Image: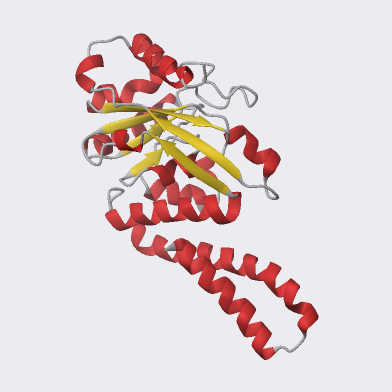
Amino acid sequence: MISAIFVISYLAYVLLLSFFVHIPFLIPVWIITGYIVGVLMVILFIVINFIWMRKASPMNKFMNYMAESIAYFVDRFVLRIKLEVEGRENIPKDGLITTYVNHKSLLDPVPLRELFRRATTFTPKSEVMGWPVIGQYLKYLGALSIDRSSDRNTARGLVEAIKHAKSGMNYIIFPEGGIKSREDERMVQMRPGAYKIPMKAKTDILVVSMKNMTQVRFRWPWKATVIKAKVHPVIPYETFKDMPTSELAQIVFDKVNGDFE
C-alpha cells in the first residue's frame, strides 16, 4: 500500500511535468525531485491517518498492516535493504510472544517490522518518542518508552505494555540496552531486566539473529544491502517460567550468538 502511494505519486509528478512542460533537459531534475515528492506524499498519508489512529487500539489490524507496509517501503525505497529470512516458519501466527534481537543500528526496527505479519511494536528510548512523526507513530503502535532518567515513568509504561502483551502484542526488545558495539554484530551484553514482559505477561519468547545491519551506513545510498535474519524456534513460557532472569538472559544470548559461530 505505502509503496504504491510512493510509486503513483512519483510517476504522476514526472509524467505530468513531462506532458505540460516541454523542456527535455529538465527531465533528470523531475526524476530526482519526483522521488522527494513521493516520499512527502507518503509522510502526508501517514500523518493524515494519525486522526483516527490516536483513538484506535494498538492491536488494530489495519494499523499494523500499515506499519508492515511502511517498513517494506522504507527498506526497499529509502534504505535499499533486501531482507532474507531463515526460519520464517518459526514465527507464530497467533498466541503470545515477545521477541529478542541483537542491536547494532538505529535502523534495526525497520527490517524487523517487515518480518512480522502480526501486531508488533518496540521499546525505544524516551528520546525517540520525541522525534517528529516517528515518536507519535510509535505511541499509537503501543511502544514502551524506556526513560532512563525516570524508573517511575518506565514502570508506568511497563504496566501498559504487559497488558498489551497479554492481548497478543509482540514486543521487539533489544536486551543489550542500547548499541554497545557497531563493529561486532554479536550480542555483547545482557540485561536481565529486559525480560519482565514475558515473565509478567506469560508470553513465549522468539529469538532473532540479525546480520549485516552494520553495513547499511557504509553502502547506502549507492549500494543495496542484504540483511539476513535467522528466526530461532520459540522458547515456550513453561520452560523458563521458574528460571531466574539471569539464566534466561544467558539462553537468549547464546541463541543469538550461536548463529555467528
Work out whether 198 lies above or below 64: above
Residue at x 64%, y 36% (from the top left corner):
215
Please tell me which residue is depicted at 61% across the width and 77% down the height of the picture.
Answer: 13
| Total marks in image | 0
**Horizontal arrangement in the rendering, residue 140 relative to residue 71 (left or right):** left
Residue under the point 28% across and 22% down:
235
Q: Position of residue 125 (x, y in %)?
A: 50, 34
Q: In the picture, residue 38 is in which quadrant?
A: bottom right
Percent position of residue 90, x then y: 30, 33
Quadrant of res 32: bottom right
Q: Is residue 220 above or below residue 37?
A: above
In the rendered view, does 54 fall on the left or right side of 42? left
Q: Residue furthest right?
A: 25
Q: Is residue 208 left or right of residue 25?
A: left
Residue 233, given in percent of the width and then of the height, sits at: 31, 26
Q: Where does the N terminus fall, quadrant-wise?
A: bottom left
Residue 40 showing in the rendered view:
yes
Q: Residue 98, how many percent across, how many down?
A: 32, 31
The vertical placement of 171 against 67, above or below, is above
Colour scheme in use: secondary structure
Out of 171 and 154, give the one closest to the viewer: 171
Relative horizontal placement of residue 222, taking residue 226 as reference (left or right) = right
Q: From the viewer's perspective, is residue 211 above or below residue 188?
A: below
Q: Is residue 107 visible?
A: no
Q: Residue at x 47, y 16 (%)?
A: 190
Name the residue nearer the viewer: 41 or 236.
236
Frontmost residue, 227 versus 33: 227
